[in-house]
Image: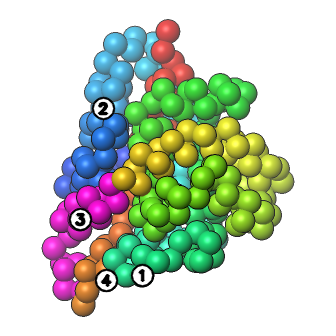
Amino acid sequence: MSVQTIEGNLATFSENDASVKLVWAVFSVIPGAPALSFYSSLAEAQMLVYPDLPAEAAAQALVHAHEPGTIRALEVADFIDKGDVGIAALAGAAAVFQLFFGDKKKALDTDPQQGADAALKALALAYLFHQLIPGTIPEKIALLRRTQAGEALLTWYAAVEIALPFADDAVLTGGSVIGHMMEKYGGGHLAKLDVIGGAGAGVNAQAMLGALSGPLDNVIVNVAKYTHQIADTAKAYLPTAIATAGTVAGAVATAADALPVYRLLVARLAAEISLERCRP
């Protein structure tokens, strides 16, 4: 089964995987974070998240699950995790944790590499939302936020890509954190998205992100209060073998770098969007 399908992606994870444990652990210390149930197939997602969905609607969800926009969203998630194929300036979450446990004085205005990485990931997520979810931009946003997985993706991005490395900046900047970040670092990334997603990908992502900036800012302000709890909890749930790294920063960074968290969360989002679209 190809991993570039919802079923293929979900089937590669188990409840004991480090990726799953890390996400669940991070969310456990963030008040208001979505309460997630683990599932490894579209059928399990339907049973756990949408138990009242009629049988004919569940069958239609399977059709949505194989649409080109769904497959494209899964591909972009894979790009985000791998980093070296062009979506991310930094691979995984390694630099985020290194920054947190190391020089916390660095922030959006003083660490352009980290800011550029966060901006590019925001655009990549906005692009995959645009591909995955039908309708106008307001309709896309509404459908995204009706799903547990949509809230989970926004929470993870806000916590790991913004709050951990830039907590002080996120609280003190004033105005829109996402708007400030995109103004400073986002412009040069639109062409990169066009290369990956085709002509217009950057423009579509920019429009989608503009509509998401308010909700993302709200999540960032909330999770920025819990950076130490997030980091300490995450550290405890990393694979034991990683503890042989020379420093705490090295241990957390090495493990996070190897974890395909975006592939996990986007596969869940694709499953739930496919099911949500079929609700009566």
Residue annotated with mark 3 = 232
Q: Is residue 19 visible?
A: no
Mark closer to the observer (4, 3)? 3
Going by the numbered disc 3, the residue's amino acid type is Asp
The residues colored magenta run: 226-245
Going by the numbered disc 4, the residue's amino acid type is Gly
**In the image, farthest residue toward the bottom:** 246
- Sequence-first disc among 3 and 2: 2
Tell me the number on the disc at residue 250.
4
Residue drawn 58% across the image and 58% down it: 173
Residue drawn 31% across the image and 46% down it: 30
Residue 238 on the magenta span: yes
- Sequence-first disc among 1 and 3: 1
- Sequence-first disc among 4 and 1: 1
Mark closer to the observer (1, 2)? 1
- Sequence-first disc among 1 and 2: 2
For label 3, the crowd category at 10 Å Cα-Cα, with few meaning under 14, some 14 to 19 and many 20 or more, is some
